[in-house]
Image (cartoon, rainbow, N blue to C red):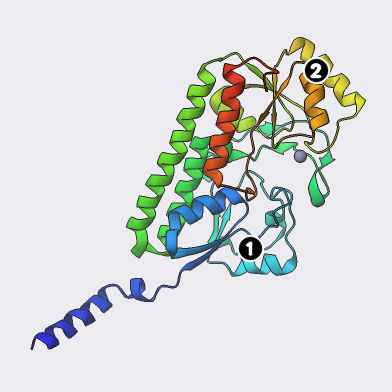
Amino acid sequence: MRRCIFAVMGFLLLLSSPSVLFAEPLTVYTVNYPLQYFTQRIAGDHARVVFPAPADVDPAFWMPDRKTIGDYQQADLIVLNGAAYAGWVSKASLPRLRQVNTSKAFKNGFITVKDTVTHSHGPAGEHSHTGTAFTTWLDFYQAVQQAQAIAEALIRKQPEHQSDFEKNLAALRKDLMTLDLALQKTLAAKPRQRLFASHPIYHYLARRYELHIEDMVWEPDEMPDDQHWQQLRLVHESFPADWMLWEKQPLPQIAQRLDSMGIGIAVFDPCANRPAKGDFLSVMRENIANLRRAYTNQATSS
Ligand SMILES: [Zn+2]
C-alpha cells in the first residue's frame, strides 16, 4: 500500500512539473562579453551562454563568419546590446522572436556622437564612432536595466525557473549597484576634475557620473603622430586635464610623453570582450581603483 502511494505521488509530481524534469538547458548567444556575463549569472545552470567572438576583436565592429551567424540563428535566445551595437546584426537575418534588445527600456536616452574620425583598431577594418554611442553598460544603472531585460526573456522561455532567475538577477543587480555607488563616491572627491579620453567610448559613463571629458581618437598600441600631439597640446591649454582614460595600458613611449605634459594614465577597460583574467566585476573594480588614483592624487604620481 505504502509503495503504491509513493508511486502515485511520484507520478503526480512528474505531471505537475514536466518541464523541470525534461527541460534542456537553453542555448543563448550574446553579442559581447558583458551580456554573456550578465546572462550566465542570471541563467545559472539553466542555460549555456555563448559569446563566440575571438578574444582579439572589438565585438562592436566584429563580423562573424557564416557558420557563426548560423549558430546565432539556431540559438533559443539572441541577446543584443541595441544602441546600434554590432553592425552585423542588422545585416544578418536573425529570428525576430528570439532576439532580446537589452537597451530598449532606455532607448530614448541614447547619446549621439558627432563627427569622429574614421580609424581602425584590430582586424575588423575601418570604422568611426559617429552615430549612436553604444558602450551602454558603463553606466551601471543602464547595465542593470539590460540585465533586467535578459531576465524577462529567460522567464518567458522557462517560466518554471522564474524564482531562480529572479534570485540571480537580484544578486547581479546588487553587484552592479555596488559598482555604481563606488564610482559615485570616488568621483565626488573632485567633481570638477577634467579628463581626456583616448577613445570616444565613455559617453554614458560621463553622463551618469558627471565626468568632464574631452575625446581623442588614439590607440593604446600605436604612437600618435605629431599632428595628434599638437592637437592635444592645443586642447590642453583650454582644458587642463591631468589624466587620460585608456581602454588598456598604452605603449610606454605614449605614457612617457603624456607624463612629460603632466598627464597621467587611468585605464578604464570597457571589457567588451573577455578579459585575460578575472571577470566583468573584477575588471570594473580595477577600473574604479584606477580612477580613484586620479581623483585623489596629483598627476605624474604613477
Ligand atoms: Zn574606435
Q: Give the number of marks.
A: 2
- Identified by mark 1, the residue type is Leu
Residue 260: image tag = 2
Can residue 64 be seen in this snapshot?
Answer: yes
Residue 158 location (% of width, % of height)? 40, 64
Instruction: Tell me the quarter of the image containing the N terminus.
Output: bottom left
The residue that mark 1 highlights is 94
- The vertical placement of 120 against 55, above or below, is above
Q: Which numbered disc, 1 or 2, marks the residue that appears first in the sequence?
A: 1
* Along the viewing direction, whichever of 101 and 120 lies nearer the viewer: 120
Instruction: Tell me the quarter of the image containing the C terminus.
Output: top right
Residue 105 location (% of width, % of height)? 50, 42
Residue sticking out furthest to the front: 302
Frontmost of labels 1 and 2 is 2
Q: For the point 69% across and 54% down, which residue is it?
A: 55
Q: For the point 46% across and 56% down, which residue is it?
A: 153
Residue 108 location (% of width, % of height)? 56, 36
Q: For the point 50% across and 54% down, which residue is it?
A: 39
- The vertical placement of 191 against 9, above or below, is above
Q: For the point 79% across and 16% down, which residue is it?
A: 261
Residue 261: image tag = none
- Ligand 1 resides in the quarter of the picture at top right
| Crowd tier of the residue under label 2, counting other residues whose Cα lies within 10 Å: few below 14, some 14–19, many 20 or above | few
